[in-house]
Amino acid sequence: MKIAAVAIDILEVPVEDAYLAGGRAVESNWHILARITTDDGAEGFGYMVNTRAQFIPSIASAARELGDLLVGLNVLETEAAWQAMTRAAKWVGPGGLLHWAIAPLDIALWDAAGKTLGQPLYRLLGGFRDRIPAYASDRMWYSLSLDDLAASAADHADAGYTAIKLRLGREATPAQQAERARVAGEAAGLGVTVMVDGTESWDLPYAHLAGRALQDAGVKWLEDPVHHSDIAGLASLKCALDIPVTGGENLYTLAQFRQTLEAQALDIAILDLFRIGGITPWPKIAALAEAHRIMVCGHVVPEVHAHLLAAVSNGHMVEYMPRSNAILVDPPVPVDGMFVLPQTPGHGLVLDNAAVERFRAS
């Protein structure tokens, strides 16, 4: 059960349908793929995904150095491994690029641990249930015309989703923000919840106006209306609005989540698996949220987040926005809006080795 080898690869995975993120056209999702092999033959893999090519070489270099520290450790001692990596790089952390480098290694470690024990990941982490609701979050971009937005919302509803999320922030007035939500909701039809992501694009006065307009339009989720550092602003929105205020995907550490939750700034906490540094810290943050009586969701990477959300009693919904299907064999997808967990050991994903070779950048 000792870790015998760690390998890191950079993959440039093309996007099937280019989209806009942060004002940039995204045509590739860069992956840092980590593979761990134990001395008794177990193999685990994990990855992180980022759209910014300029950061990938630095993250990959850090992951290779951190991976060397894992050789010789017991694959089941995930906390010891995570602490060893963070202590070794304490001069650049916590958080930041360090967590992006740790994340693929930590996911691979848990996958190998699950395979060693013959158990699926969600069961290792608590096994609260074996399925979790999913909401559709892809193809709901700022850049879509109202007609294209309506078509995408209708497609998601036809696929069985009972909740959809669109991005807002580029419209001039709160009324125009609400109009996009109305169009999506009408196209999706009755029984489909409309959620919106403000992408930290508004100042506080505007967010209050937009929030009221959106709740009047029937929206049931307001994500990242202001910058995550404006904890007092988030708390004021949470108190003033009937619509749930959600956020947290831009937080990196347990301490940041504690500060935000203690301020009662969120109704639902969102965890980004890569920013927090992988699976090992995830249950700690979920437990902190549970202590504050709030639910948790995950930011993208649904194929792994489904395990984490199903493992805990306060797991809410999976954001279905896949970014890695092109490197997986038969990737899991929600059916009628429900993500059913695989019963195979580890995270249950299978690498498409031919695709890995095709997309390898270094």
Image (tube, rainbow, N blue to C red):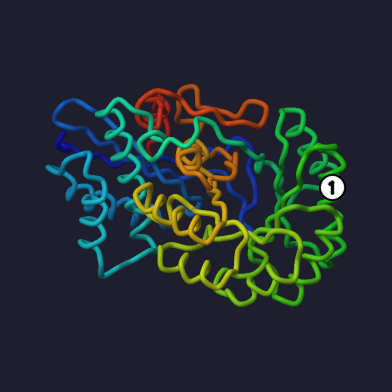
- From the viewer's side, name the closer residue of 22 and 2: 2
Picture coordinates of residue 291 (x, y %)? 48, 59
The image shows residue 5, relative to residue 352, as above or below, that is: below
- From the viewer's side, name the closer residue of 323 and 261: 261
Q: Residue drawn 55% across and 57% down?
A: 293
In terms of image quadrants, where is residue 152? Answer: top right
Picture coordinates of residue 354 (x, y %)? 39, 24
Q: Amino acid at mark 1?
A: Leu
**Circle 1 is placed at which residue position?**
146
Crowding at dot 1, Cα within 10 Å, few <14 / some 14-19 / many 20+, comes out as: some
- From the viewer's side, name the closer residue of 23 and 347: 347
- Helix, strand or loop status at disc 1: helix
Image quadrant holding the N terminus, namely top left
In terms of image quadrants, where is residue 179? Answer: bottom right
In the rendered structure, the answer to whether residue 10 lies left or right of residue 209 reads left
The image shows residue 73, relative to residue 66, as above or below, that is: above
The image shows residue 16, relative to residue 21, as above or below, that is: above
